[in-house]
Amino acid sequence: MLYMVEMNVNIPHDMPEEVANEIKATEKAYSQELQRSGKWAYIWRVVGEYKNVSIFDVESNEELHTLLSGLPLFPYMDIKVTALCRHPSAI
Ligand SMILES: O=C(O)CC1=CCC(=O)O1
């Protein structure tokens, strides 16, 4: 099942820089492992925003929820999930 996931990151301004950098490094490793597995199929930066648009290819809503809620930045993100299916005009 394919999903478009929009993640808008809002790290609190009063979070110490070292703490934020550690969380971002852990997030990067977590996301790259999922990218290597094929479950996190694409990730793009949205120009001019601390936001990404990603495509996930997972088995179920539950699996997607588990992966997203395990993101180290999860407590600091607004996440919008859109389920996708093949367009009838796609070739
Ligand atoms: O920087 C972001 O958009 C948040 C994020 C998700 C995966 C990652 O490595 O960073």
Image (cartoon, rainbow, N blue to C red):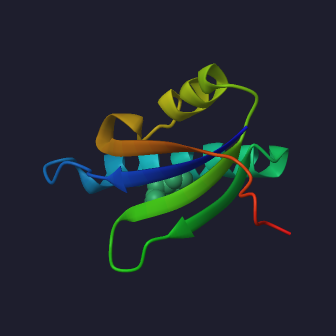
Most extreme residue toward the top, as rendered? Answer: 62
Task: Classify the position of the N terminus by image quarter.
Answer: top right
Most extreme residue toward the left, as rendered? Answer: 14
Residue 66's x, y, as percent? 58, 23
Residue found 35% across the figure and 54% down from its top = 8
Most extreme residue toward the right, as rendered? Answer: 91
22 on left or right of 20: right
Asked whether residue 85 appears in the rendered view, the answer is yes
Residue 88: image quadrant is bottom right
Placement of 51 over or under 62, stated as above or below: below
Placement of 4 over or under 91, stated as above or below: above
Asked whether residue 25 appears in the rendered view, the answer is no
Residue found 48% across the figure and 42% down from its top = 81
Pick whichever, 6 or 2, lies toward us: 2
Residue found 23% across the figure and 50% down from its top = 16
- Tally of marks: 0
Residue 18's x, y, as percent? 34, 52
Placement of 46 over or under 52, stated as above or below: below
58 on left or right of 80: right
Task: Classify the position of the C terminus by image quarter.
Answer: bottom right
Most extreme residue toward the bottom, as rendered? Answer: 47
Residue 38's x, y, as percent? 81, 48
Pick whichever, 17 or 11, lies toward us: 11
Residue 72's x, y, as percent? 47, 37
Pick whichever, 84 or 17, lies toward us: 84
14 on left or right of 23: left
Pick whichever, 77 or 15, lies toward us: 77
